[in-house]
Image (cartoon, rainbow, N blue to C red):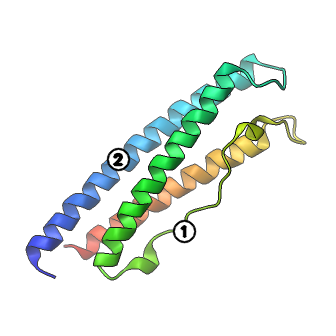
Amino acid sequence: MEEKEKNILNQELWALVSLSFDATKHDFEIMEKMLKCVAKEDSGEMTPYKRKVIEELQLEWRFLKSLHEDLAGIAARLGKSEIVPAVPDLNISDELWKVGKSGASDALYETSDKIGDFQSAIQDCAFKLQEMCV
């Protein structure tokens, strides 16, 4: 691979890392909204605020999957597709707000954790690929 192509891939990877950090920031904002919903609302009803949290999680998930696709493309060009993390199977819907055995929306927190783990895996993969471009 030519030096020029490596530099271009490195710049693309930095852009992906930057975007993934934006997604992490957004994830914290979503978590704050989730906690506000839990603190304020006792009912098991779907409220507009709860719906907004689900919509934001869905938007974030689509964004992360598009980052993953871009990362997979770069990894393929470097011949390192095997280090790209697998996409977890998530169903982000209103059902996440259902209260579990612990008295909390367990599925919602588990899904949020899986999204966070996937974000971290994307960032780690991007950093590993950057090392190959140096």
**In the rendered structure, which disc, 1 or 2, sits on the residue that comes first in sequence?**
2
* Mark 1–mark 2 CB contact (< 8 Å): no
Find disc 1 in the rendering and name its residue. Answer: 86
- Which residue is outermost to the top? 40
From this view, report whether residue 41 is shown above or below residue 89. Answer: above
Position of 41 relative to 57 (above/below)? above
Residue named by callout 2: 19
What label sits on residue 45 in the rendered view? Answer: none
**Residue 102, above or below 45:** below
- In the rendered image, which quarter contains the C terminus? bottom left
Res 128 visible: no
Identity, as a three-letter code, of the amino acid under mark 1: Ala
Q: Which quadrant holds the N terminus? A: bottom left
Give the residue displayed 39% in from the left and 49% down from the top.
Answer: 20
On the picture, is 46 further left or further right than 88?
right
**Residue pictured at 77% horizontal, 40% vertical:** 95
Q: Residue furthest right?
A: 101
Where disc 2 sits, the SS reads: helix
Label 2 CA crowd tier, 10 Å (few <14, some 14–19, many 20+): some
State the CA–CA distance, disc 1 to disc 2: 19 Å
| Residue 126 x/y as whole percent | 35, 64
Measured along the vertical axis of the image, is residue 46 above or below residue 128? Answer: above
Q: Is residue 125 visible?
A: yes
